[in-house]
Amino acid sequence: AEKGLKDYYKDYFSIGVAVNVRNTSGGDETELIKKEFNSITPENDMKMVSVHPSEHVWNWENADKIVDFAVKNGIKIRGHNLLWHTQVGAWMFKDSLTGQNVSKEVLLSRLKTHITTVVNRYKGKIYAWDVVNEAIDDKEDVFMRNSLWYQIAGDDFIPAAFTYAHEADPKVELYYNDYNESNPTKRDKIYKLVKSLLDKKIPITGIGLQCHWKVETPSTDDIRAAFAKYASLGVKLQVTELDVTVRRPTKPGETPDTIAAYTPEMSARQTARYKEIFEIFRENKKYLNNVTFWNVADRGSWLDGRNSLAGGAAATQAAPGQGPRPQGAPPAGGPP
Ligand code: G3I
């Protein structure tokens, strides 16, 4: 078979991509996934609100389809995620009778039920979980994000989540996953949190670096420093959600519709950027075991809905082979 990214990188790390059921149900994107990638992450279908929309309701349909696709095709699966402050049903935090916030004890017991059920269901099929996602605040003088998890359970929900996941599947790899991971302030906080978990002998395998980046930032110095700092903990690292945006609104009043087309100059800058960041990834192969792109193609990228385009032109205008999608990705603008 024709070689894909996964084959070129087989001596370094697995190459992954975020997917939805649509991407894995046949068609050009499905063929692309099979050729280029040996790891997938469900983009939304394993999040709390997707699988556990209310206390006694479980919805496995989409998650199961993605898992079946991966197992059938010999593709590894990263689970995403077991705990986040968003995409979680409001019921999780509320007493159904009074509507008031539940106690810490009740919240942790609901969390345990959730994590145990989900991890158990995919035991032996999912090799790594993002256990806690984005629990740290971005602001300089604030450590933890002031989520309902934090308001109700303080710091304790984090070690609890890792412990429950490990109890459900002692073999599965467990990651703390966050963005702005290369910003020195956030980096030091992530380091401190993970170090405190390791010091307490909490079962954690490593750190997920989301890497939602731009062509210009973060600097390669900051990226190298972040990898070095995390690696100094002796844990595994994964790049979990890589984006490299180049075509974005930069002037007041610009929108995805009025912004300049994706130019050859933008394409060249994006290519150079991929070259420099993959150099850094290769330098870190001792710790880094996976690099996952967030979405298959510009078509369907989460960025296109956020006034901040993924890279190539808006889906219907993008030229084949351009944009942040891996080399060989299908042209944007196919069926929705
Ligand atoms: O499922 C509903 C659908 O029923 C409804 O009709 C539709 C109308 O808006 O919304 C659908 O939900 C959307 C969901 O994606 C599934 O498509 C949500 O509105 C939308 O907010 C959600 O966005 C996801 C986002 O996480 C949620 O914050 C993105 O697709 C997903 O790419 C993004 O991924 C996150 C990672 O999990 C964590 N790191 C950051 C990353 C980017 O934000």
Image: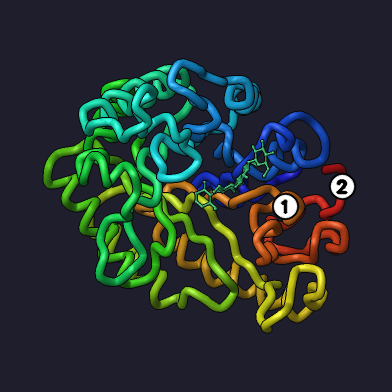
State the quadrant of the C terminus.
Answer: top right
Instruction: Identify whether 89 is placed above or below 318.
Output: above
Residue 14, how many percent across, how many down? 52, 44
Instruction: Determine if the C-beta at disc 1 is less than 8 A from ligand 1.
Output: no
Which residue, as the protein is rendered here, is positioned at the far left? 200
Position of 140 with respect to 272 (left or right) is left
Amino acid identity at mark 1: Ala
Seen at 27% across and 46% down, the residue is: 150
Give the residue number, with chain letter if any, for mark 2: 334
Residue 199, how many percent across, how many down? 12, 47
Give the residue number, with chain letter if any, for mark 1: 297
Give me the C-alpha separation between circle 1 and circle 2. 11 Å
Seen at 21% across and 28% down, the residue is: 105
Whether residue 40 is visible: no
Res. 102 image quadrant: top left
Seen at 79% across and 66% down, the residue is: 313
Q: Secondary structure at mark 1?
A: loop
Q: How is the image coloured?
A: rainbow
Instruction: Identify whether 253 is placed above or below 155.
Output: below
Position of 221 with respect to 32 (left or right) is left
Seen at 68% across and 83% down, the residue is: 251
Image quadrant of ligand 1?
Answer: top right
Which one is nearer the viewer's eye here, 256 or 12?
256
